[in-house]
Amino acid sequence: MRVLIALGGNAMTGPGGDASTESQQNAIALACERLADLVVAGHDIVLTHGNGPQVGNLLVKNEMAASEVPPVPLDWCVAQTQATIGFTIQNALGAALRSRGVHRETATLVTRTVVDNDDPGFRRPSKPIGRYLPRERAQQLVEHGQHWEDRGERGWRRVVASPTPLEVLDTATMSALVGSGHVVIAAGGGGIPVVREADGSLRGVEAVIDKDLTATLLARSLAADVLLIATDVSHVMVDFGTAQARALDRISAAELREHAQAGQFGSGSMGPKVEAVLGFVDGGGRRAVITSLDRIADGVNGTYGTVVEPTTG
Amino acid sequence: MRVLIALGGNAMTGPGGDASTESQQNAIALACERLADLVVAGHDIVLTHGNGPQVGNLLVKNEMAASEVPPVPLDWCVAQTQATIGFTIQNALGAALRSRGVHRETATLVTRTVVDNDDPGFRRPSKPIGRYLPRERAQQLVEHGQHWEDRGERGWRRVVASPTPLEVLDTATMSALVGSGHVVIAAGGGGIPVVREADGSLRGVEAVIDKDLTATLLARSLAADVLLIATDVSHVMVDFGTAQARALDRISAAELREHAQAGQFGSGSMGPKVEAVLGFVDGGGRRAVITSLDRIADGVNGTYGTVVEPTTG
């Protein structure tokens, strides 16, 4: 089967989002053991991934070195993380496959994702990124055109646009590479955000794109059989935090949407993941799964995790 | 013809190596006008590029933010520049082609280059990178394992290993993409340096690889017809700075090697370029050219620049 795997940031950093080189390498090595299982099982794999903690570090560097080196915009930061995470995965997956006596070609494609210049996200930036700063420092950055919000005790935090992804570029290239036996790593961090100018050319913009929404778009463009979002919980929960709390296992898209409409998943981390899997199955996808990284092989087979399938009847 | 173009750092920064986002974008936009001419002429193109000023900026950020964010190693810096330069080229080349009424797919591949862990460069780091620092600051970094040298009046400068590239990975992937009509951007900055461990797995190492030597290796692996090194001079000169100074135009590999052995090109910028083109032609390449960016279309055709061809007779 052709499988699109979306790895969460937690799969690529140490405890507490520690994004040191070594922590990233260690976390990615673990993740690649599970990915190698999928490769050995014979699946064709496209891998995408988050980059929140990594971009956070790049923003701190931007700030702290601004007196000496011109800061780079957010789209450049996203690009940077695509490359560092991508080649680290290539090294680690190669090693994990080698220990299983298997060789597969891998490719990391720098990937742009088109968003709408008129997306409401650009008028009302709302996605928090990077570290908290004291008010005085935040206000200096506001004067340089950034948006910062008072988040109370912890300080101020930058908010940026998180526009809806419209098109992942170069999916034909990815499809050709997967077809010729590559494990493809693409659209990291949701893709480098670009807008289309009036003349049709593309321009990078200061934004971050939700990686799970991009994963849905990518899975549909690639005609993937399965979209699997790997996260730090084994199942999507309903009535979380109450005596009636229960894990969702196999569920129809219609039933999951009812839970979403009843406000079960909030707007934090799980809400967008649920929207992403619904978007895939409603768009014709065969199976979408949310589960923990260590069970992705079972998840792809539909035997573990929250397994969402098309509504029948 | 299949053409490997190596763009120098000067083609991608502003005056004085200014590597701000805007300067890089402007310089790359100019370079892509000339690249678009080559595409329109019907050539199949793989593009590689330098990254010196860009890595220099990343090293400054590493240093200045070290109290808050763990610095990343050199191989990560190289990876970062592959992505930022790559997608900026993709945007600019797309626009230049669009203005000519042409569409071609492009792809930026994150690329690793294998070097030998026993390369003498690792024992005697000699490639200067990044900015000059005062002695006191340099010595702190020496205590953290880095190599710095006293460069006199300007201060101290970091030196790193510049090992010989042995193998550019994923060239079969590049070849397939070029064959299917892509302009491929690959092995930026000479490639991300990796060494092969005893068990065969790959590990990134702190080094930078000469991008012109990697270009030669890549051109040979891809069976390119032409290797063109685009730089800031129109021709290689002999007897430079004397009354006998003259530009080399069409020349055999044997004759060029005689000039090199006579010490005409030094160890700075032109010596490695000459070695790179000789390596390509001596290895079976049809034509290697050193010329300025604005004349690459003529250079590829062998009608301008220093055009090196196999020794005959």
Image: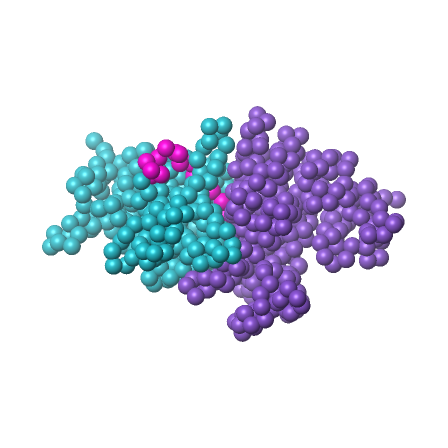
Chain colours: A purple, B cyan
Q: Is residue B108 visible?
A: yes
- Count of numbered circles on the image: 0
Q: Position of residue B18 (x, y in %)?
A: 38, 61
Q: Which residue is painted at 50% across and 32% down in the image?
A: B201
Q: Position of residue B246 (x, y in %)?
A: 17, 51
- The quarter of the image holding the N terminus of chain A is top right
Q: Is residue B26 visible?
A: no
A17 left or right, relative to A91: right
Residue at the left extreme, as displayed: B243
Q: Which residue is painted at 43% across and 62% down in the image?
A: A69
Q: Point out the stretch of residues depicted in magenta.
A: B105-123
Q: Position of residue B66 (x, y in %)?
A: 47, 55
Q: Which residue is painted at 21% across and 36% down in the image?
A: B254
Q: Camera-side residue: B49 or A132?
A: A132
Q: Camera-side residue: A56 or B176?
A: A56
Residue at the bottom extreme, as displayed: A143
Residue A172 lies in what quarter of the image?
top right
B104 left or right, relative to A154: left
Q: Camera-side residue: B153 or A37?
A: B153
Q: Which residue is painted at 48% across and 62% down in the image?
A: A64
- The quarter of the image holding the C terminus of chain A is top right
Q: Position of residue A37 (x, y in %)?
A: 65, 32
Residue B53 lies in what quarter of the image?
bottom left
Q: Is residue A83 magenta?
A: no
A169 left or right, relative to B73: right
Is B94 rendered above or below residue B200? below
Q: Is residue B112 magenta?
A: yes
A125 left or right, relative to A310: left
